[in-house]
Amino acid sequence: MSDPDVMTAFTSGLADINLDESSTPRTGARAAGMKSASASIYDMAATLSGRGDLWNWGMDDPTLVAEIQALLPGFTEFGTDGFSEQLYYLALRDLPIGLDDYAGRVVLEVGCGMGEGLNFLSRIAHGARMTGLDLSPRAVARATATLSRGEDLRFVRGDAEELPIEDGSVDILVNIESSHTYPDLERFLREAERVLRPGGILTHIDVFTRQRFRTMRRITEEIHGLKWIADHDISAEVRAAVRRRMAPDSHFRRVLDRQRMNPLVRRIAAHSQILMFGGMFAGYQPPTSIRVLSKLGIVPWMSGLPMESYRHQVAVRT
Ligand SMILES: C[S@@+](CC[C@H](N)C(=O)[O-])C[C@H]1O[C@@H](n2cnc3c(N)ncnc32)[C@H](O)[C@@H]1O
């Protein structure tokens, strides 16, 4: 598939998965096509991303920033803006297992991207054995080359719906802004149920359309081995981070400004980045120049999916 074909397959797959409860592609050619497009998209992202980059929309909560600073002073040392790390911190905060109780525990992150988030967690939850798993071969190769540390932090390629992990072997399963791309959410949650040991915890963070949230509620009622103990709507904090990233003096705008691009190309690049990092969810309105270019068909117009909420949900394996 060429790059535009991959993008079309990915966006139409996302729409199928997140908008249509009845015809969610569960298996077969459509699901396989979506996964192949998804792997290609994140392979491209892995080629373009720099050290320290995370791939989620982030959240902005000063209380969390203060707590992270206390645990890990200078946690944005690779020059990130720290919003994405806050989501990772939230994933482990307030769980039945405290941050001082990770020695020897097995942590699995499904959909780990280039591994930067899991690496960050390894610095605040000491002594755990952490594995990051992702569908994108290039993301896994980058994570392995730059971050792996023997049994303490390793990365494997795999599919969330078919985890290459032994039954009952995981203490904490982390999943951040990844499951909305899985054709079969039920298969993933059943895999989580299978690989978690009794008392193990699934900490799940993602963005939802109204339809996908309903699908998730229906599925969770049917999976008896996972007892859901929290469901927090963190949309306001996520929107706050996206808005700060969109602001004219933001870290991400400064990174773009450093690159040698003509001003119009930079504006187009900023527009695509804002769309990818939750702009529509935070009420982004493209500038007039982008509207004109998109009317002329020069810049693709992406309205994005009508995402309704961004949530943190926690389940315990019974
Ligand atoms: C938006 S990125 C988030 C990455 C990372 N969790 C973060 O917050 O920076 C979504 C990730 O999910 C991965 N992914 C998508 N479908 C997957 C699947 N079926 N199995 C495993 N990983 C998948 C993608 O390759 C990508 O790395």
Image: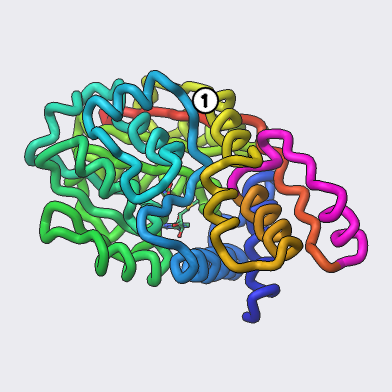
Q: Does residue 72 appear in the picture of this structure?
A: yes
Residue 159 image offset from top left, x and y in percent: 39, 60
Asked if residue 40 is among those painted magenta in the image, a careful observer would answer no
Residue 90 lies left or right of residue 179; in this view the side is left
- 50 vs 120: above or below: below
Residue 61 image offset from top left, x and y in percent: 46, 23
Q: Nearer the viewer, residue 28 or 119?
A: 119
Image quadrant occupied by the N terminus: bottom right
- Please give the name of the residue rendered at 13% of the width and 52% of the height, measured from the top-left corner: 152
- 57 vs 142: above or below: above
Q: Residues within 10 Å of mark 1 (few under 14, many from 20)?
A: some
- Please give the name of the residue rendered at 39% of the width and 48% of the height, measured from the top-left corner: 79
Residue 58 image offset from top left, x and y in percent: 49, 38
Q: Amino acid at mark 1?
A: Ile
- Please give the name of the residue rendered at 58% of the width and 28% of the height, measured from the top-left corner: 240
Q: Does residue 218 appear in the picture of this structure?
A: no
Q: Quadrant of residue 139?
A: bottom left
Q: Nearer the viewer, residue 284 or 56?
A: 284
Residue 15 lies left or right of residue 158; in this view the side is right
Q: The magenta stretch spans which residues? A: 277-297
Number of labels in the image equals 1
Q: Quadrant of residue 295?
A: bottom right
Residue under numbered circle 1: 234
Which residue reaches farthest bottom? 2
Q: Nearer the viewer, residue 146 or 235?
A: 146
